[in-house]
Image (cartoon, rainbow, N blue to C red):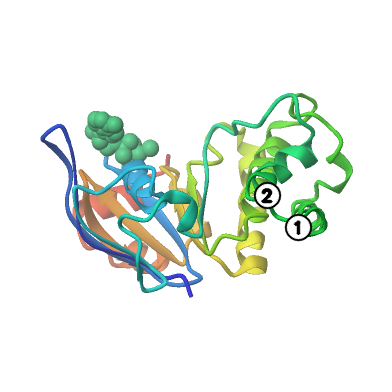
Amino acid sequence: MAEVKLTGINKSFGGHVVIPNLDLTVPDGSFTVLVGPSGCGKSTLLRMISGLDQPSEGTLRIGGEDMTHVQPSHRGISMVFQSYALYPHMTVAQNIDFGLRLAKIPAAERERRVAEAARILSLENYLDRKPGQLSGGQRQRVAIGRSIVRQPKVFLFDEPLSNLDAALRTQMRIELAQLHQSLGATMIYVTHDQVEAMTLADQIVVMNGGRIEQVGAPMELYERPATEFVAGFIGSPK
Ligand code: ADP
Ligand code: MG
């Protein structure tokens, strides 16, 4: 079980309040998308969930357990970034395997998990290549593969497709939806792309200036926006 629950979260940087007082429940197994304009606090929120950053106040629970002060590697979470940060000198297989080696998982189990991730991501024929020999979409799949093999309960994505061209974004969107279906994990996904949000989400969280404007299913926000801001944001094409 990996519901993510934020209660009374406040985040300030040097006295400047970025997130004043935020409550949010991300249901177990949901595909929850955070949307909102640049600078509204989406990445900050993800960083606090992952443990890369600490809230100034408030509590974070994952699967009912208080994780507010637990170190990132013990949260059962994995984060996929916009920039892939693959190791250029390693093969695809070695890149996917790297975190498992660090975690001292036995070799046979590592091999099994890498093969399984490669199958899910259609990378079976690319395992011996270096990142420089891959397309942008393949590199992004390798980055996702590195997350999958850790078997996290929660995946965090920070604008993972924003560096890709439009056709590839569409393709990756379909693949991410399939990935969510096959893994059944909780996914929290940041984007400023309304189409991505509307097509991927079970639940959309609309943020503005560090606050939540509305939480709801895509059609709910589309048909019954709670504020002018939500109406403008969901209704306007990119
Ligand atoms: P988003 O991801 O929605 O574009 P961010 O979470 O990156 O927004 O940033 C939210 C606000 O917090 C911005 O005003 C940004 O300048 C500020 N901020 C983020 N990280 C830091 C930091 N490490 N130090 C100071 N201010 C920061
Ligand atoms: Mg951001």
Residue at 54%, 41% in the rendered image? 160
Q: Is residue 235 visible?
A: no
How would you rate the neighbour count of disc 1 (Cα within 10 Å): few for under 14, some for 14-19, many for 20 or more? many
Residue 187 or residue 108, whichever sits in front: 108
- Is residue 150 left or right of 94 when viewed as pictured? left
- Is residue 104 left or right of 234 when viewed as pictured? right
| Nearest to viewer (mark 2 / mark 1) | 2
Instruction: Please provide percent x and percent y for residue 223.
Output: 33, 66
Helix, strand or loop under label 2: helix
Whether residues under marks 2 and 1 lie with C-beta atoms below 8 angstroms apart, the answer is yes
Instruction: Please provide percent x and percent y for residue 27.
Output: 41, 71
Helix, strand or loop under label 1: helix
Residue at 79%, 33% in the rendered image? 91
Write down the residue under mark 2.
Answer: 100
Q: Quadrant of the C terminus?
A: top left
- Is residue 63 left or right of 165 when viewed as pictured? left
Residue 172 or residue 133, whichever sits in front: 133
Q: Amino acid at mark 1?
A: Arg
**73 to 136, vertically: above or below:** below
How would you rate the neighbour count of disc 2 (Cα within 10 Å): few for under 14, some for 14-19, many for 20 or more? many
Instruction: Please provide percent x and percent y for residue 202.
Output: 46, 67
Residue at 60%, 37% in the rendered image? 166
Q: Amino acid at mark 2?
A: Leu
Point out the quarter of the image occupied by ligand 2: top left
Question: If you read the primary sequence from the N terminus, does the residue marked by circle 2 or circle 1 appear first?
Answer: 2
Write down the residue under mark 1.
Answer: 113
